[in-house]
Image (spheres, grey):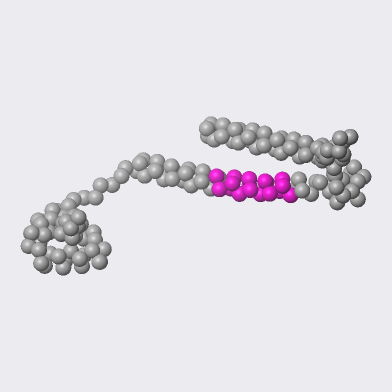
Amino acid sequence: MSEHDKIRELLALAAADALTGAEEKQVAEHVRSCIACSKELGAWRPIASELRRLPTPQPSSWLVQATLARAEAKLIEQAEHDWNRRVLIVVVAFAWLLTIASWPAFHFVSGRFGSLFEPQFSHTQFGQTQFSYRWISFAAFTALAWLAGGVAAVMLAVRQRGERRLA
């Protein structure tokens, strides 16, 4: 696209005073040297002048109220979404911390706190190493706790979504 064509696209906006300072300067310089663009700009000026005289359409009050209510609902929904995300991050971090902290508590309750730092493997008769029963039971307990928390979170989300639909 040539420079002339770019300027021609800006002529209607120039007549309506809708250009930036740099664009106005560019159009003014081009119009001084181009008779065709100067005539076209002259033709656009009366049209822009008459358009400015027309009354500005005003939206009805119900449309304004409905738009404001929608925007407010969208902002509330976004704020709730952000809050839920922050709460979820805190809950997950707390759950991981609780899981890590429960390992020493599990050893303390089972009376084997001193064995916390010892290897927790047992040997089978064929010389293969496998996890001890304590590791497996703790892993199962942790997995069950995480699964229960996930199910609870899904149930709460479904309930909250249902309540939102009724509102």
Residue 3 in the image: x percent, y percent?
18, 60
Residue 87 in the image: x percent, y percent?
63, 47
Horizontal relation, residue 69 to residue 4: left or right: right
Question: In this view of the protein, which residue sits in the foreground, 164 or 86?
Answer: 86
Please identify the dominant SS of the magenta region: helix
Residue 70 in the image: above or below residue 15: above
Residue 86 in the image: x percent, y percent?
61, 49
Horizontal relation, residue 86 to residue 136: left or right: left
Residue 35 in the image: above or below residue 125: below
Going 53% across and 31% down the picture, which residue do you hit?
166
Horizontal relation, residue 127 to residue 52: left or right: right
Residue 123 in the image: above or below residue 28: above
Q: How many marks?
A: 0
Magenta segment includes 91: yes
Question: In this view of the protein, which residue sits in the foreground, 3 or 7?
Answer: 3
Residue 132 seen in the current view: no
Going 63% across and 45% down the picture, which residue do you hit?
88
The span picked out in magenta is: 81-97
Residue 24 seen in the current view: yes
Instruction: Give the quadrant of the N terminus.
Output: bottom left
Residue 28 in the image: x percent, y percent?
16, 66
* Extreme residue toward the front, this view: 126
